[in-house]
Amino acid sequence: MMNTTIEDLQAALAGKNETESLALLADLFPGQIVFSSSLGYEDQVITDFILKNKIDIEIFSLDTGRLFNETYMTLQKTNNRYDAKIKIYYPQTAAAENLVSTKGPLSFYESVENRKECCFIRKVEPLNRALKGAKIWVTGIRAEQSGNRHDMPQLEWDEAHQLFKFHPILHWSFEEVKEYVKSNGIPYNPLHDKGFVSIGCAPCTRAIQEGEDFRAGRWWWEDESKKECGLHAK
């Protein structure tokens, strides 16, 4: 669609459920809509929407080179379950090699700047390649995940990437996500059963304790206000 406004899309999506919305966007932007999956609970729900209903949306994931083995197992089980091939993007070899050679394999623990450098090389740059040419970026973001996401719109304009972002399960609760996964027999990361809520790279993710914030297990050694990797502005 040429010169489509966010108001046009919001009007088109009004009254439609998650699957209907994804199918409509895929029809409106053929070959230009992608879904980024980290293979966590939320993303597995959206993967099921897309693959079970054969919606023409490319699913991709970022392999940082530092993921948990359980995450790779989830990727394999998901591909097998749906007879699919989730596209994988890796960091640029030269950049990753230079980082580890010059600063060591654990430089991200030493400062926020080092950690953000690692995130940029392993996640942000590959994401930029994955989004190249896309007009719609589907995500598994939920409003509950952090305070600054409570007032997010379900459909928004991403100025940095110059595309629309759509969050189909933005208003789902964590319990609703888990129930959908369990009741539909969807493969999920077994680390979720061990207290891991938000799962990223192995050196940067831990299980959370009862009562802790959803994001407490990510970059736990840093100040709460700095806990973003650059994939999402919010």
Image (spheres, rainbow, N blue to C red):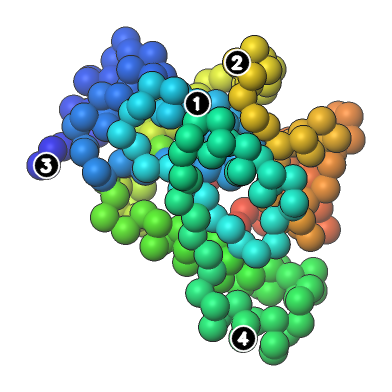
CA distance separating discs 1 and 4: 38 Å
**What x and y, as percent, mark residue 234?**
52, 45
Residue situated in front as seen by the camera: 172 or 226: 172
Label placed on residue 98? 4
Q: Tell me the residue that label 2 is attached to.
A: 184
Hey, what amino acid is under mark 2? Asn
- Say which residue appears at 62% left-offset and 86% top-offset: 98
CA distance separating discs 4 and 2: 44 Å
Is 172 left or right of 111, judged from the image as shown? left
Is 39 left or right of 5, judged from the image as shown? right
Mark 1 element type:
helix
CA distance separating discs 3 and 4: 42 Å
Label placed on residue 48? 1
| Label whose residue precedes the other's in the sequence (3 or 1) | 3
Q: Are marks 3 and 2 in contact (CB under 8 Å)?
A: no
CA distance separating discs 1 and 2: 9 Å
Is 56 left or right of 234, judged from the image as shown? left
- Say which residue appears at 70% left-offset and 56% top-offset: 67
Is 25 left or right of 18, judged from the image as shown? left
- Say which residue appears at 46% left-offset and 45% top-offset: 85
Number of callouts in the render?
Answer: 4
- Quadrant for residue 207, please give it: top right
Q: Is residue 149 above or below residue 110?
A: above
